[in-house]
Amino acid sequence: MTGSITINVDDGSFTAYRADPAGTPRGAIVVIQEIFGINAGIRRQCDLFAEAGYLAIAPDLFWRFAAGVELDPDVKPEFERALQLMGQLDQDAAIRDLETTIRTVRGMLPEDGKVGAVGFCLGGRLAFMVAARTDVDASVGYYGVGIDGLLGEKHGIARPLMLHIPVEDHFVDHDAQARIHAGLDDHPKVTLHDYPGEDHGFAAAFGSRRSEEAATLAEGRTAAFFAEHLG
């Protein structure tokens, strides 16, 4: 079953796409959007997690300036608009929205139910920040941009975090990847997976960016990670 919920925060409210499992949820997963809004690809990610038994929620993080926007990364003008929207996002406010979402979703689960987060692109960066700044139970980030500039927050990561890193990411060069590895390889809560030959967006649910073999490998790793840490 799919639908939407409204989440209230101090300065307003926003909607979130909701996908429910067939039975009692084994846990919940907050799906953090790319720069393209809660589009068909993000909804599909939610639906897949619901099929695996999780309650999945994708909050609209652009609600303050572009509520309900849905963009297609394969359409150049829409991709360019998405880059502009990313520049308008207050990422600290987005983390507060995500923290409220995590708290809201936790209240929708049976007692002691656990909540994870998974993010893609912009969401991959925010997944790292969520791991460092909130009490989320486990987090996964796909091709997060600028994580090498956030390593000063790594000491805040108290629960498991997995990052998927495409080696040929044209938004995250090899030097940045080396800094990420140097900063996180020895962190007891962090697991890094590199994908040689893959570019940014390789695990998108739909579209030309998807690289099927690598995406399937990453998805399997994410599924096992959440099964271990959420239930």
Image (spheres, rainbow, N blue to C red):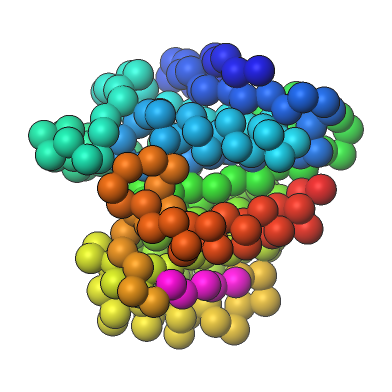
Q: Residue at left 12%, top 39%?
A: 76
Residue located farthest toward the front when viewing the structure as drawn: 213
Residue drawn at point x = 46 percent, y = 64 percent = 214
The part of the image, by quadrant, that contains residue 86 is top left
Residue visible at 66% across and 18% down? 1
- When the figure is inspected, residue 72 is found, relative to residue 63, above or below; the finding is below
Q: Nearer the viewer, residue 205 or 82?
A: 205
Q: Residue at x 82, y 26 (%)?
A: 23
Q: Is residue 79 left or right of residue 46?
A: left
The overriding secondary structure of the stretch rendered in magenta is strand
Residue numbers of the magenta segment: 191-195
Which residue of the protein is positioned furthest toward the right in this rendering?
111
Whole-percent x and y of residue 57?
A: 58, 30
Specify whether residue 100 is in view: no
The image shows residue 12 at horizontal and vertical percentages of 44, 16
Residue found at the very far left of the displayed protein: 77
Closer-to-camera residue (80/14): 80
The number of numbered badges drawn on the structure is 0
Residue 51's x, y, as percent? Answer: 68, 34
Q: Report whether 69 appears left or right of 23.
A: left
Work out whether residue 136 can be spotted.
yes
The correct choice, above or below, for 82 with respect to 12 in the image is below
- Residue 62 painted magenta: no
Residue 164 percent coordinates (x, y) = 48, 64
